Image (tube, grey):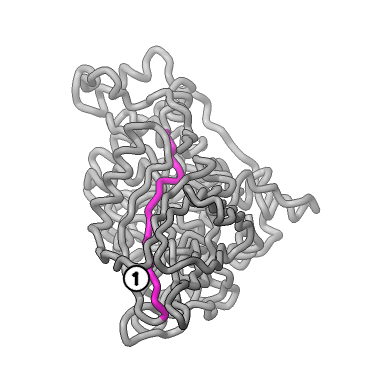
Amino acid sequence: MSLGYAEKLSYIEDVGNVGMVEYFDPSHVLREKIDQLAIMIKKSKHLVVFTGAGISTSCGIPDFRGPKGIWTLQREGKALPEASLPFHRAAPSMTHMALVELEKAGILKFVISQNVDGLHLRSGIPREKLAELHGNSFMETCPSCGEEYFRDFEVETIGLKETSRRCSVAKCGTRLKDTVLDWEDALPTKEMNPAEKHCKQADIVLCLGTSLQITPACNLPLKALRGGGKVVIVNLQKTPKDKKASLVIHGFVDKVIAGVMDQLNMQISPFVRIDLFQIILVQALSNDKRYVNWTLQVASAHGQKAALPFIKSVEISFLDREDYKAAILDKQPFRLKRRTAYNKAFEMVLKLNFSDGCGCSSLEIDVPVDFKVSTDCFDFDKDYIFQKLRDKAVLESRCGQNAVIERKTILTPRSDVTTYAIVTNVVQYGKACKAALDSLSNGDFKKRKASVTGTGSSRKRSKGSSKCKSRSDNIRGHT
């Protein structure tokens, strides 16, 4: 985890108010409360979810007030926890993905998050149904036209400051700004206004993994009470709003949500991460037109000067050309310069070695080069290709699937730019879901499911379609 994460949230409350005790409901009480919550969600007409750091701890991102939270350790003079993987490679938790399923089913109407980890967007919650009150570490925005850019790298600044990139909207070009608030920054109206609106309309505001102490955000859920709505709190610590809640559950958020999804007979889909990169070939013909001076670059799809965090190194070899020397590029920008005969075609093999946190270790891509032949340009339907890649990754239970999504030619300097999409992570939640349900299940948990689903028995499923598949949570594949 880079400098950013602890600092990016440290503005929101004084460090002294930390180290709260964790509470756990007894197993039989927890099961009863999960039943109650599932029934409330099933009957809900306007469900709003309000999330805090507690929904991301299972993603390897520490919280703040827990026994190993950032502020707790700071107060005790202890070192901050080591991140189990780079911040930019954190994958959504089972709870994040369950919320996506509830949104797709039309049950969840809006999500309000105090987190800056970007995991709600990455999980698939539509931007128009999400308010990120404190910003997003991976988001840049244009102050002129309002265009947003969701990055695969952590934006280098905080405090709504200018970054090194500019808006790519035609006739704009304004320098972009980060979106993470600093001490003196007020909550943005663009996020607060829809959050307030949906809380006032909500019949349930479900608070997940938040101690509800960060003002003014913590008062948003209470706006539901004025319209007859209810507040439900799922958190390991007690909160100042517990007395206002209709239901308070002390338990791990993932375990609670796994139980709720089981009671609702809803399946949690895998998370498939797709990243983009570009291969850029710049060429210049020599004065005698016998040779080509060319430069190959493996670059970010977010701009040539942007970071490419998921690629560690690039190995380049040439097929059937012993006179062309192979190369290893281990520093960004990944760039190779060569001079070859104009009339000789050749083929390069690029081995991309991925960074820690990716589900596959490497990928090989063939790049044919013939300077005498013009390049075909195209721009495929990206959403269609992304869905095909996701479907294939889930079916094959591995990552590494890739496809070209765009190819274009730039005249000055003469450059061919090819954009690739690649599946870099597949996360299945079956193992974690099964473990959570096993810890909840005893003789009567399954029986009570009938009162939630409204049937005498759970819905029949074909073999292999159970909600909790016992696959590995993070499936690593090789290409």
Which corner quadrant holds the C terminus? top left
x 63%, y 61%: residue: 331
x 42%, y 80%: residue: 413
Give the percent coordinates (x, y) of residue 109: 27, 53
The local secondary structure at tag 1 comes to: helix
Q: Which residues are magenta?
A: 413-428
Looking at this view, name the residue that lies furthest to the left.
Answer: 455
Q: Report if residue 398 lies within the magenta region.
A: no
Image position of 306 (left or right of 347) = right
x 49%, y 65%: residue: 296
Q: Main secondary structure of the magenta part?
A: strand
Q: Quadrant of residue 227?
A: bottom left
- Of residue 311 and residue 259, the one placed in the foreground of this image is 311
User: Please, is residue 345 above or below residue 443 in the view?
Assistant: below
User: Please, is residue 436 above or below residue 166 in the view?
Assistant: above
Give the percent coordinates (x, y) of residue 289: 42, 77
x 55%, y 58%: residue: 309
Looking at this view, name the residue that lies furthest to the top.
Answer: 443
Image position of 392 (left or right of 209) = left
Q: Report if residue 426 lies within the magenta region.
A: yes
User: Please, is residue 156 above or below residue 240 in the view?
Assistant: below
Q: Quadrant of residue 400?
A: top left
Which corner quadrant holds the N terminus? bottom right
The residue singled out by tag 1 in the image is 193
Q: Is residue 210 visible?
A: no
